[in-house]
Image (spheres, rainbow, N blue to C red):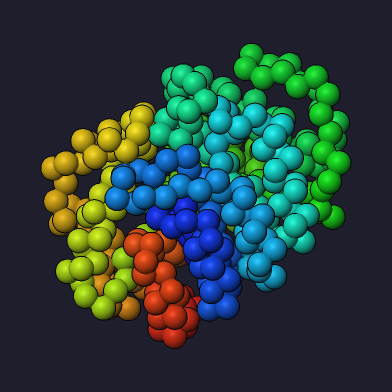
Amino acid sequence: MVNVGYTLLSEQAGPKELVDHAVRAEAAGFDHLVVSDCYSPWLDSQAHSPYAWSVLGAVAHATSRAALMSYVTCPIRRYHPAVVAQKASTVGVLSDGRFTLGLGAGERLNEYVAGSWPHVQQRHEMFEEALKIIKPLLNGETVTFSGNHYAVPDAYLWDRPAQPVPMAVAASGRQSATLAAEYADAIIAAEPDPHLLQVYEQAGGARKPRYGQVVICWGPDEAECRAILHDQFRWFGLGWKVKAELPGPDSFAAATQFVSEEDAATGIPCGPDVDRHVAAFRRYVDAGFSHLALLQVGGGSQPMFLEWAHERLLPRLREL
């Protein structure tokens, strides 16, 4: 049975609302909660972007059962890797071991506030160095590290959960999938690509969790859902090579000014039809994912969505 999660999308809700949504999602029966870690929304219309780690601490305190995950944190610019390890272990303690640290190489949109944005090869080098720092710290080791990008003279985490916080690494190709298999306890992938998961398994990731995210826009009126999706989520189909390089919401607005509602809704189910949402979820199940978090587009619709999901959607997903 697939582990069904819910996305606390920080770009579309404020911190108090996100904590409320987390409590409601746990009560509705979701197995895990993933929190986006962004400095800025993708478009001005989303209108939010609180500090994900403050939200995680509050959610850890307000919930008791659901697993938690950062989805995902970039440890190469805005945060130093040693500080990421400290934050992750602290949330691990607060959540009584329910937290997984999700990591990725980031996007300029969320990291530019810390200075210049490295080119892609530098980012990959920095990311691997970050993993070499974070993993032993989470395992309770004292770390001394000297690399091309980071220096850690002497670091140790004094507060850690009983079991080390597991790591999951976002991957989009062979190189990153291999990196996930080598350093992490799980993989995160954005597309229902069975080949990518096969590469991960062959590189050493067999029998490890495989996380994905299924974007939907549920509501009683399909036309209204399509309008909401276009207004807040039309950037989604740009592709990671573009999304990683654009600097801010104005750039994403310019890059998507000619995206139509039909274009935005390609591959994303909109409206009240439960079968369409189940079908979108099934694509990832069939590709081999073990953990899937639903992302409901539209900040104001979350309470109604969670009630509907409890009554109509989750029972269907449990059958897959």
| Whole-percent x, y for residue 269 in the image | 28, 66
Give the answer, above or below, for where 116 lies relative to 105: above
Task: Out of 133 and 65, give the one closest to the viewer.
Answer: 65
Q: Residue furthest top?
A: 148
Give the answer, above or below, for where 30 lies relative to 298: below
Q: In the rendered image, which quarter is residue 238 located in? A: top left
| Left or right relative to 154: residue 45 | left
| Whole-percent x, y for residue 241 in the image | 35, 32
Total tally of numbered discs in the picture = 0
Residue drawn at x 75%, y 57% is 94
Residue drawn at x 13%, y 42% is 258
| Left or right relative to 304: residue 70 | right
| Whole-percent x, y for residue 10 in the image | 47, 52
Give the answer, above or below, for where 205 lies relative to 223: above
Can I make out residue 178 in this image?
A: no
Residue drawn at x 53%, y 74% is 24
Q: Quadrant of the N terminus?
A: bottom right
Task: Out of 140 and 153, give the one closest to the viewer.
Answer: 153
| Left or right relative to 232: residue 56 | right
Q: Residue furthest bottom?
A: 311
Can I make out residue 114 in this image?
A: yes
| Whole-percent x, y for residue 205 in the image | 61, 47
Q: In the rendered image, which quarter is residue 261 located in? A: bottom left
Task: Out of 92 and 277, give the one closest to the viewer.
Answer: 92
Residue drawn at x 81%, y 53% is 161
